[in-house]
Amino acid sequence: MKSISYSSSIYNTDNLPSVLESSFTLVKQFNCFTKDNLFVMIDKLERLKNEDFNRVHIPDFEYKVDGNILTYDTVFIKGWGVGTLIPYFTNIIYEDIVQRDLDWTFDDYGSSNFIVEHNTDRIFAVDFQSYNYLPNRDYRESKWKKFEKLNSNVLDGLSKGEWINPAHHPIRQCQN
């Protein structure tokens, strides 16, 4: 698995700055309970490894299976979950993910699922479970519009210093 390195500063014992190189990984584990669920997850991850979403990137990852437990390690993307909040990035996600010509794409358009890397402004899709077989373009558009409204409500609340938890918002509760 390729890592993405970031500079990190510390002060040594002489109080002089020193630069370190750091990288992050995220480990996610699933109990799939059944072989059928496990095979669905493996199929998704295998497909995702070979996908090209144009301007939206997928963090490098590896996975392993032990019984019905699937564990994947992925490069953690240091950045901001603003991909679906800022018009420049939103347009890219809409074109390369929602309007994608292929039937496999992502369908959870929450802002935390699209991270803009802090030094490069590259967009990363980080919610691998929302990568699905979605041939129905009307369904994608409908979900996109619901998430636009949800993301707008959250951003409006933040601009007023209020927290609107997207996971508990009424729009999110009726998204399917």
Image (cartoon, rainbow, N blue to C red):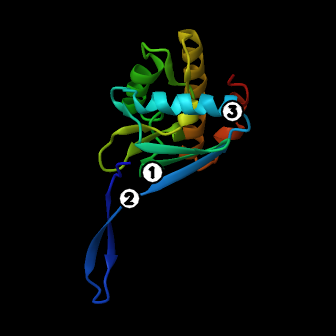
Looking at the image, do the residues carrying marks 3 and 1 touch, with CB atoms under 8 Å apart? no
Q: Quadrant of residue 70 in the image?
A: top right
| Of 92 and 130, the residue lying toward us | 130
Sequence-first tag of 2 and 1: 2
The secondary structure type at the circle numbered 1 is loop
Neighbour class for label 1 at 10 Å: few (<14), some, many (≥20)? some
| Whole-number angstrom distance, CA of label 3 to CA of label 2 | 34 Å
Tag 3 residue: 35
Question: Viewer-nearest of labels 3 and 2?
Answer: 3
The secondary structure type at the circle numbered 3 is helix
Q: Tell me what residue is drawn at x 35 percent, y 50 percent.
A: 118
| Of 64 and 140, the residue lying toward us | 64
Amino acid type of the residue that numbered disc 1 sits on in the rendered structure: Phe
Amino acid type of the residue that numbered disc 3 sits on in the rendered structure: Lys
Up-down relation of residue 168 to residue 143 (above or below):
below
Tag 2 residue: 23
Up-down relation of residue 5 to residue 59 (above or below):
below
Amino acid type of the residue that numbered disc 2 sits on in the rendered structure: Ser
Left or right, 129 with reference to 62: right
Q: Percent x, y for residue 165?
A: 66, 43
Question: Viewer-nearest of labels 3 and 1?
Answer: 3
Q: Which mark is residue 29?
A: none
Q: Tell me what residue is drawn at x 57 percent, y 20 percent.
A: 145
**Screen quadrant of the C terminus:** top right
Q: Which mark is residue 76?
A: 1
| Of 81 and 87, the residue lying toward us | 81
Q: Tell me what residue is drawn at x 29 percent, y 86 percent.
A: 15
Q: Percent x, y for residue 108?
A: 57, 30
The secondary structure type at the circle numbered 2 is loop
